[in-house]
Amino acid sequence: MTMKPAISRFREMSRRIFRDESGATAIIFSLALLPILGISGFAIDYSRANRVTQKMQDAADASALAAARQKKTTNAKLQEYAQAYFNANFDDDGVMATPKVKAKYVSAGVHVEVGGKVQTTLMDLFGVDAMHTKVESEVRQETGPTEIAIAFDTTNSMKFGNRWSEATRALGVLLEDLKKAAGGDDFRVSFVPFGDRVNTGVSRKDWVDDSYDLTSWNGCTEPREESISGWDWNLTDQTPSELPFTPSVPATYGPVKVIYGNQTPACPNVEIVEPTPSTALVEQRAGQMQAAGTGRFDIGMAWLHRLLSPEWAGVYGSPKWPRPLGESSKIAVFLSDGNTEAYRYEVGGEAGSVFGWNQGSQWGFENMVKVCDRMKLDGIEIHAIFVAGNPHFEAYLRDCATSDENFHRVEDVEALVGAFKKIGTRTTELRIVR
């Protein structure tokens, strides 16, 4: 027996009872029946409305997630897409008309609202033919606490000419998006310009061996290589208090070898940026970089590790950053074309299987991969951007990336901007927040 014929028979039976003139039966029965019908009708219809509402919520969540994944467009087109996706995912069981979907863009996401009516059955006897229902869903790009460190090769072959400003702007957009996704206060970014060495800054004299004359020190440090398991050039994340750095002192050369064509290894003009919430500072420093040097990629990668390693908590001034493993997303971005002469003189020199002029060496590139392996053990997600250059370097840099999707091969500024966007997409998640 279907519900509507049963209701019709019930109404007819009720009318017969109320027409009964044999006594008080109709009055007593009606007085007892009305409350029972009201309570039962409300319970049945309310249960049905809840079931339909939950189906609406599921379809609205799916619609909001799908809409948020689409390329940003107008609110009108967004609403059209959201409505179509909702319709395809909502099974109304024939109890209501197609609900109306309202969709709009909100900060870092999409908001969807759906309203409709659930037709009643027993409540219709009391003049209530429908129950209104509304659901909302909001999806945003979120990451939770996030630490990102970026290393840029500053050598001469890395110039993008007068279009470098486009790359730095794209970097700024990436960092701002990640900051919003992390919630602002739970975001830190670090920056590592690297040439043959890294400039840690003259203010960090407590990081270096104080037995050297630091009068003319420019802030650069030596690689701080360690011999581990028969490999003499390991670069680890030990803190300065555990193992001080050796300063590069141009005036006396100190431990710096006079190589590279009678020149000392080149130091970037811009010092590292320690963990900071200021994306503008990193964008500014990136715009100030000047090309110099041939490139020690393992050193640049090692400083990414040190800027993200929980072993360095408090070294940069805040005991909270870098955070312990598991308490934040740790992201490293490394950008280089792989051209270098440094390894002809360092990390084994000519004996380290040099590939050719400006092509680096097998041992030098393997030393970088060893650093990457240590970073992965610390839960650091590595994005490797290869600015198409040295073909011998590409495979090693690909090994550094934590996945094939995290390796980005670019040939111009447009592709570099696209790589930054992909990194932003891969390092954030769409989450339902309402």
Image: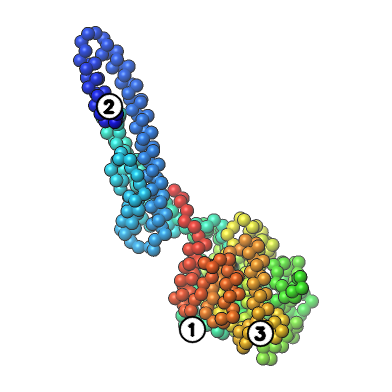
**Amino acid residing under circle 3:** Val
Task: Tell me which residue sits at (30%, 40%) in the image.
Answer: 94
Task: Tell me which residue sits at (28%, 43%) in the image.
Answer: 97
Q: Residues within 10 Å of mark 1 (few under 14, many from 20)?
A: few
Q: Which mark is residue 355?
A: none
Task: Name the outermost residue toward the front.
Answer: 1
Q: Residues within 10 Å of mark 2 (few under 14, many from 20)?
A: few
Is residue 106 in view?
no
**Amino acid residing under circle 1:** Gly
Name the image colouring: rainbow
Q: Which residue is mark 1?
A: 161
Q: Which residue is mark 2?
A: 6
Task: Tell me which residue sits at (36%, 40%) in the image.
Answer: 52
Q: Which residue is mark 3?
A: 354
Q: Are marks 3 and 2 in contact (CB under 8 Å)?
A: no
- Using the rendered view, name the quadrant where residue 146 is placed: bottom right
